[in-house]
Image (cartoon, rainbow, N blue to C red):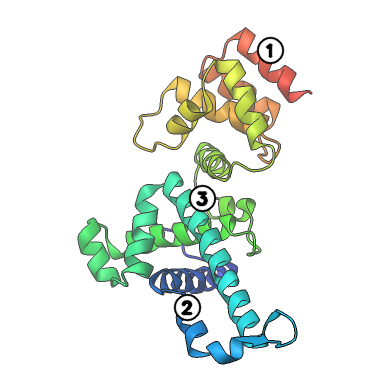
Amino acid sequence: MYKKLNDQEVKIKKIVVNSLRKYYKLQDEKDDLTVEMTAVSTSLLKISQDIHYLKPDKYFISAVLEKEEKETFVSNYSSYINMLDKYNHELKELIEFKYKLNYSREKISLQTYKSLTRLSYYLNIAVLLLAVLDHNIDYTIDNYIEYFNQYTLNYQIKEHVKVLCVQEEGDTQEVFDQISKIFNIRKEEFLSIILNDNLKSSRYILKLFYTFAFLHPNIDFNLQNFKIKAKNTKITNTEMKTILNFKNK
């Protein structure tokens, strides 16, 4: 059974939905000041006859500041949408169907072959993930992982790792470097494996997930649990020694 949103998550969803509607609306607008400047050309610039001096009036400054604010919002939200796309392309498509194209849930359901219940669940996941990515919203990655508390620890670890990988913030780059040295794998190759939901799980893939989770300071995955996973995924003694050296730095 798909989990429903709690009261806090419902409030978070409303904030994200408002931002999405604003984002797609601004994308459709041609926010060009040229027309405004032409319409009020006589008042935009006050020219002194004694000296060559141009002074923008309050209307012009306000218009410029408003334009910059809109452009910053669109730029930031575009990056969030791109991160959502990296995390799961299907989630990004669902968001666009719903909030860009304004499709009804019934139409999206028919187009994606998902039941309405399942569709609502995936839309909720997408919205909550956007809340994590948007630093202006008080909703953390830990809050997001709590939404999956009915799932196994393995599933929660994978979700946590995936979100950190698309964010690429803070200590994540250092963990990328450590993983690269331990398993002789390039960052790009590592990300292509971690973020590809179509790949069938193997010991090697699980090894990458668990090692990343153990090394990353933002994931609560202790040594005892990691040793159990290391044994199951056949992490070698040499690899384990290198991992512990990095962890204890």
Cα separation between marks 2 and 1: 63 Å
Badge 2: residue crowd in 10 Å (few <14, some 14–19, many ≥20) = few
Q: Is residue 7 left or right of residue 217?
A: left
What percent of the width, then of the height, locates residue 144?
57, 54
In the picture, the quarter occupied by the N terminus is: bottom left
Looking at the picture, tell me which residue is in the foreground, 82 or 59. Answer: 59
Cα separation between marks 3 and 1: 34 Å
Amino acid carrying mark 3 in the image = Gln
Nearest to N terminus: mark 2 or mark 1: 2
The numbered mark at residue 34 is 2
- x 34%, y 59%: residue: 94
Amino acid carrying mark 2 in the image = Thr
In this orientation, does residue 53 appear? yes
Badge 1: residue crowd in 10 Å (few <14, some 14–19, many ≥20) = few
| Viewer-side label of 2, 1 | 2
Which residue in the structure is indicated by mark 3? 150
Looking at the picture, tell me which residue is in the foreground, 43 or 181. Answer: 43
Q: Is residue 63 left or right of residue 155?
A: right
What percent of the width, then of the height, locates residue 166?
53, 43
Query: Mark 3 and 2 residues: CB-CB less than 8 Å, in contact?
Result: no
The numbered mark at residue 241 is 1
Seen in the picture, residue 171 relative to 56 is either above or below; the reply is above
Looking at the picture, tell me which residue is in the foreground, 20 or 229. Answer: 20
Q: Is residue 47 left or right of residue 144?
A: right
- Does dot 3 land on a helix, a strand or a loop? loop
